[in-house]
Amino acid sequence: MKIVENIPIEIEKEEVLRSLGYYRKKKSVLSPSIDALIKGERKKAKGLIQAKGVYVILPIKSKSKSKIILKNITLKGKAIAKAMAKAEEIALFVDTIGPALEAEVNRLYQKDEYTKATILDTIGSVAADEGAEYLNSLIVKKAKKESTPRFSPGYGDWDLSIQKRLLEVTQASKIGVTCNEAFFMIPRKSVSAVIGLY
Amino acid sequence: MKKSFLERLKSEILVFDGAMGTELPLNLGRCPEELNLTHPEVVAKVHSSYVEAGADVITTNTFGGNRLKLKESGLEDRLEEVNIKGIEIAKQVARGKAFVAASVGPTGKLLEPLGEFTFDQFYDVYREQIKVLAQAGADIIILETMIDIQEAKIALMAAKESCNLPVISSLTFTEEGRMVTGSDPLIATTILEPLRPDVLGANCSLGPKGLMKVMKKFASATDLPLIVEPNAGLPRMVQGKTVYPASPDYMARYASEFVNLGINVVGSCCGSGPEHTKAIISKVKSRKPKERKVISRMHLASRTKAVSFACPVGLPRRLVLRGLSFGDKKPIIVGERINPTGKKALQEELRNDRFSLVREEAKRQEEEGAKVLDINVIGEGIDEARALRKAILVIEKTTDLPISIDSPNSEAIEKALKVVGGKALINSVNGKEKSLKVILPLAKRFGAAIIGLTLDKEGIPRTVEKKLQIAKKIVKKAVEVGISKEDIFIDTLTLTVASQQEQALESLEALKLIKKELGVKTILGISNISFGLPNRPLLNATFYHLAKRYGLDAAIINPKDVKLKGSSLALKVLKGEDKGAKEYIKVQKGIIEEEIKPKEEADIRIQLKEAIIEGNKEDILRLTEEALKEELKPLKIMDEILTPAITLVGERYDEGIYFLPQLISSAEVMKLACERLNKEMKKETISTQGRIVMATVEGDIHDIGKNIVSLLLSNHGFRVIDLGKDVKKEKIIQETISQKADLIGLSALMTTTMGRMKEISDELKRRRINIPTLVGGAVVTSQYAKKIGATYAKDAIEAVRKAKELIKEKR
């Protein structure tokens, strides 16, 4: 298991806009006032985000069309089996941006600052995703291998219940990530995923 | 006799006599006219010298016979005598061999705003003298040596209205080719021609050479018969005596040239005598009047500036090159800004009889390119007739633009017309009988142009045909009254494109047709087109440029707007290609928020609505307070302003024009307004669409979606009891019962928590609680919703819609 501290987070503005439902094709309008709000929340977010990650690379014990058996964990489902078909080994990883941003989002909602809250929350999601992308490419670089696309619990028929085991195997608690009985990760702005390396 | 003077004018050049004043011996009386009483034989001698010389017309010694002039010599009590005697002397000499033209000179006083005298005072002075002269047997009235165009106009009106004699209006020009108060021959013609003088022209002033330029302008501007009576050159002082340098031959050579120009009546003035008359006769008497073509017709004028609305056919290129404004086919800009509607400061000023803002607006609009100023002073607490009159006097001192009198009130229009020192435009008459009957004669009397609106007692017609029909009626009536077609502007009416989109092109088609069929001019009040839409100047400018292509002659608009280029997006709105202006609004949205808008001018309703649409958090509470202060009922504010605004935002969100933050910021601002309004309403009267218990189900800790739905629902008048996130089934059901909820709203983000929705639904059924359930969230689908007996909403906007439907069904 490896811990990665201080994952650099850019918070791509385009990605934030897209996540907020802004479509160029539909000629959505970005008004100056909203643009300013996004700018402000992005700046604020940079001070609230502390992105960290953990990962493990596990050899494949066996794989079929409906499951992949690794040491300590079995990935069940046709979708995940298909997605990992090429893989020689599997990397499991978790990243989080920490609890500070969502605390601020909650505070904003409490103050009826709905717009800022929504924007900041979306920024958190974008940041968590960027963290996952960073880990993904870091793993690929270190392994000097190619990787399959990222696959997370809940995708296709991969049952969310795997979340708990995935967090245990990666020892995500070391970066502060746990999950509740409905398998929601806490902090919310966290990503868990697997990639196949080949 | 009238017939014969005018008849003869058609087929021959008529020669007037020479000077009277300079032919009379000095120092015989207090004024030349006194000689009619004291030395009639001296006057008769002058007349007979001209008759002997062969003059067709002799001019009476009554030039200064008006009350104001005679008063200077203390003769005002003998006004009748002086004038009657003047006619009698001339008639005795003429004995039918020559026409007797009764001379009427200026008062020697100035009209307001230049001087102290009013229209009515001058009118009475002229009427008094002219009545006497006509009754005494004059053949012709000659109003001569006029130095101010407004005075010339009043004299002409008085003459035409107090007798049936032919009336000659003869003006005097300075070396600059203008009258003392600034009017050139084009301007003078523009102003006087509608009053139909029988002969128009110039006398005295510059000598024959100088008047040649003046008469050329007259000849190009009118088809009325023209008169010229130059003085014998510019007087010089030689050894203490006034000497006029022009010899009879010199004068005669010019007379011939005047005839070449198309002048019909030639005479001479100060410094000339019978020899001059004789010489002139020898040169011109055998000539025939030459036909003239009007090549520079102007349509409106102030004392010092004339405006043409058309590019005359066959216009000589040199006129264009000399910078006369012909050939400029852009619609003439009639500045619309002097109008208190929606301008609190201006209203306040006008109510208090102050006009500094009027002055400012006039100046600014002139600088920005207005060629005519529309003046409207209608507003609560404003004495319209008084304010209009004063505003015009102020504007005449400030700018030299012609004036458009914007009023439906005939009394106010008449008072205004009396102070306009030019030819005004009356805005407006319409197809209603009453309007035609009252306004048209006023226009005719004062020689004003008119705007005819294509509406009648049935309102504004929506079809091109009906508009044409009303225009026809207006034109027919106007022509019957004696108004020239040149002076009729038809306005096919601009309706706001926001509510009558198809009417924009309809109006333009109508004006094109009317112009072609009726040969009149067209005008449109442009700005109404953009009412209710963002970036109005852009739409206005685009409509202006579009209307240009349909041959619009004049546009009532903020001249500032015209400087903008049209935009293709705005054009699509006008052409109806952008239905409901959706595209336009969405693009403008970004722009208008940065603009500094004259907020204080907008109606509070519009401001409030805009604040919601723009998500303007800073101003919302202030605006809500203002709306309440204006005694709008809280419920009314909610139903008629806030709800339509947030609904519009929702529609734009649905179409992808707005994205989530805009939807939320509008909703957030709306919430603030609602909370404020709720304080005003008694509990029982708070309108509620229904009570909704909202929750994110147990285990689910994402509540953004649910928060937004709650916000939007409360915006739309629902009472929302938001239980928060990760809420247990038991709590949801318990609250539903105790809160007497009409609807349950559930949110779940994941497959793992979605199942909770079914559990809740099953529990409700088990307990026979018949309350509809609305569900939503990332993984929830309409199929799933159906399966568990709930209703699905994909987003907050749909949730509002579905919630309304569900509660309606339930009730």
Image: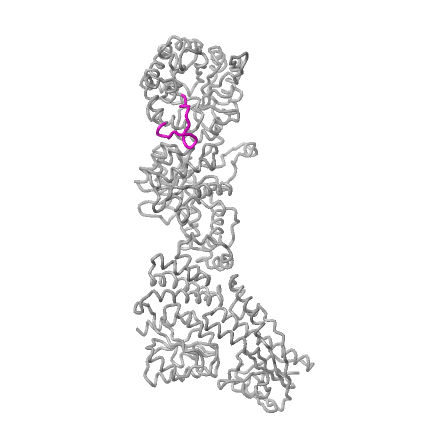
Looking at the image, can residue B384 be seen? yes
Residue in the foreground of this view, choosing between B163 and A177 = A177
On the image, the x and y values in percent for residue B211 come to: 51, 22
* Residue B666 percent across, percent down from the top left: 45, 65
User: Based on the displayed image, in which of its 4 quarters is residue A48 positioned?
Assistant: bottom right
In this rendered view, identify the residue nearer to me: B254 or A82.
B254
Vertical order, A11 against B252 (above or below): below
> Splitting the image into 4 quarters, where does residue B761 fall?
bottom left
Residue B492 x, y percent position in the rendering: 40, 45
- Which residue is found at the position 50% from the left and 40% from the top? B329
Q: Quadrant of residue B78?
A: top left
**Quarter of the image with the C terminus of chain A in it:** bottom right
Colouring scheme applied when the structure was drawn: one colour
Q: Position of residue B609 (x, y in %)?
A: 41, 60
* Quadrant location, the N terminus of chain A: bottom right
| Residue B730 in the image: above or below residue B235 | below
What secondary structure predominates along the stretch shown in magenta?
loop
Look at the picture and state if B168 lies above or below B773: above
From the viewer's side, name the closer residue of B566 and B334. B334
The residue closer to the viewer here, B331 or B736, is: B736
**Residue range highlighted in magenta:** B105-121
In the rendered image of this protein, does residue A119 appear above or below residue B155? below
| Number of numbered tags placed on the structure image | 0
Inspect the magenta stretch and tell me whether residue B111 lies in it.
Answer: yes
Looking at the image, the residue that sits furthest to the right is A144
Whether residue B807 appears in magenta in the rendering, the answer is no
Q: Is residue A121 left or right of residue B475?
A: right
**Taking the image as drawn, is residue B308 in sight?**
no
Residue at the image position 43 percent from the left and 83 percent from the top = B756
